[in-house]
Image (cartoon, helix red, strand yellow):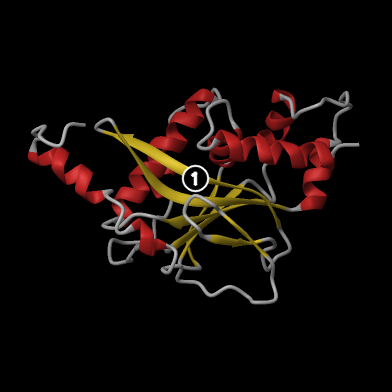
Amino acid sequence: MNSHTLMTPGEQEIKENIIVDGEAEIHENNLHEKDEEMPVEVETMMGYSFPVKLSDGKELKAIGLRKKSVLGLSFRIYSFGIYVDNRKLMDVVNSKTLENPAKATKEMYKMVIDDPAGISVKMIILISNLTMNMVRKNFNDGIGAAIWKLGGKNNELTKRIMGEATNDVKLTPGSEIEVTCLPGNVLETKVHGKVVSKLESEILCRAFVYLYLGDDPFDKVAKEKFGTCLLHSSK
């Protein structure tokens, strides 16, 4: 965008709400101290680290970056790590007889999307001036579109994601959000380590995982990295 291009007040507000605050300083703003004894993997673009294993035993399989385009500009919204229950993943991948492909197939990704229990996504916010309403709307729009792509209908449950988190909750660069697909088709969301919603819905869980492993994932490289672990989990 030309620096002299005029924007309406509304467009200017959108841009200001997602401007990254000192990306050079983001590396120092990770609010959660990491266990020194737990190895980590670093998301190289922004420098945030993700533990290779969560406290519940889930293991890190891929890390990536969520970007979004606004007014022709691309902004980095959050870094993310995809965690999986290894035993559950092996059971899912080996539930059908598959040939030994050189790379993960669409069918393999679909098997995980259709049976997503045991998957967690940890997100680390990269931008400033972010409100819970903005986060909630982003989730509603993204998951709502994924539900439609999976053949479902508009699901009112999307509006309840992070339902207990109000705008009083401060989200700054380094803030963490964690979403987990629990057994029984329950989608659990935590903000700053606190559970803010638990919603039971099969299509909701599938749609959330579809955002990362579906046909148009948030980060294609992260999806491919996850695909590598699918191959290792197969017979």
How many circles with numbers are drawn on the protein?
A: 1
Q: Is residue 51 above or below residue 68?
A: below
- Quadrant for residue 95, please give it: top right
Q: Which residue is mark 1?
A: 65
Amino acid tagged 1: Leu
Residue 115, can we see it? no
Image coordinates for residue 165, horizontal then vertical, percent: 37, 61
Name which residue lies at 56% across and 61% down. 49
The image quadrant where one finds the N terminus is: top left
Residue 225, can we see it? yes
Q: Secondary structure at mark 1?
A: strand
Taking 33 as reference, is 154 left or right?
Answer: left
Image coordinates for residue 107, horizontal then vertical, percent: 73, 25
Classed neighbour count for the residue bearing mark 1: other residues with Cα under 10 Å, few (<14), some (14–19), many (≥20): many
- Quadrant for residue 41, please give it: bottom right
Residue situated in front as seen by the camera: 70 or 134: 70
Image coordinates for residue 149, horizontal then vertical, percent: 51, 24
The image quadrant where one finds the C terminus is: top right
Residue situated in front as seen by the camera: 62 or 211: 62
Name which residue lies at 79% across and 51% down. 86
Name which residue lies at 50% across and 58% down. 47
Image coordinates for residue 30, horizontal then vertical, percent: 46, 67
Name which residue lies at 37% across and 38% down. 68
Taking 121 as reference, is 167 left or right?
Answer: left
- Quadrant for residue 3, please give it: top left
